[in-house]
Amino acid sequence: MTDGEKLIEIQQMTGLTWKDLADKVGIASAQTFTDIRGGRHGISMKLANKIIEAFPEIRKEWLMFESGPMTHKEAEGMIAMFNSVEEITDSKSSPDYINVGSCFPKAEIAIRNTSDSMAEYPVGCILVMKRVMDMKLLIPGNNYLIETNEFVTVKRLQKGKDNAHIALYSSNCATYPDGKMIYEHFEIPIDSVSRMFYVLGYIYPQANDINKV
């Protein structure tokens, strides 16, 4: 979205004419808005501050960096959403945002599930998660997203062979023709985990637009 398009959204939100909008924001002439809409220059930090002061419901992150929704009201319940577990480790990835409302008040991040290793989560659903801050408080039998330097995966956590290890299980018990499990459980050292997220639940959107969920 260009700065000119942002101004058009602000004008449509307020219902003001461009002249009245300039007066409200405190600039001498609506020509400034015309120049921005025409692409002659962008929204300066000074102008952004004036807009935010005049309309405090507008989020500065949206106005300056196009991050998240336009207003604070729209941002309630909004969390970053990645399109795969791999994207969470990609510093260049730009997440979408999804509104989980009051269904998951503790949610911090959402990730689209692209694997069938966990039978309870349909492929294409959106996993809603909360970051684990204390690794000593893990709950065996619950599902977590585990991130290491080598991989990111969603598994059911169980105790490992000792206190230094955790065992990761898949709930999909499908097997190969010879009876060997497709998704065998495995153990990893707990100190190899860089981040871990507790899976609070999932959303299965019917609409193409995830922000309508």
Image (cartoon, rainbow, N blue to C red):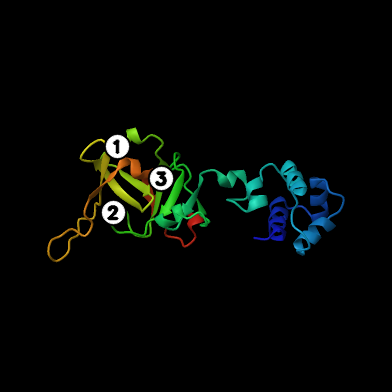
Query: Hey, which quadrant is residue 191 in on the image?
Result: top left
Q: Which residue is mark 1?
A: 139
Contact, mark 3 vs mark 2 (Cβ under 8 Å): no
Q: Measure how far apart labels 1 and 3 are at the Cα level.
A: 15 Å
Amino acid type, callout 2: Met
In the rendered structure, which amino acid carries the disc numbered 1?
Answer: Ile
Verify CB contact (< 8 Å) between mark 2 and mark 1.
no
Is 99 displayed left or right of 198 in the figure? right
Question: Where residue 42 sits in the image (x, y, percent)?
Answer: 74, 57
Q: How many numbered badges does the structure rendering display? A: 3
- Quadrant position of residue 125: bottom left
User: Which residue is nearer to you in this view: 25 or 36?
Assistant: 36
Q: Would you name the residue on which mark 3 appears?
A: 129
Q: Amino acid at mark 3?
A: Met
**CA separation, marks 3 and 2?**
15 Å
Q: Nearer the viewer, residue 46 or 149?
A: 149
The residue that disc 2 covers is: 118
Label 2 to label 1, Cα distance in Å?
Answer: 17 Å
Tell me what residue is drawn at x 27 percent, y 55 percent: 119
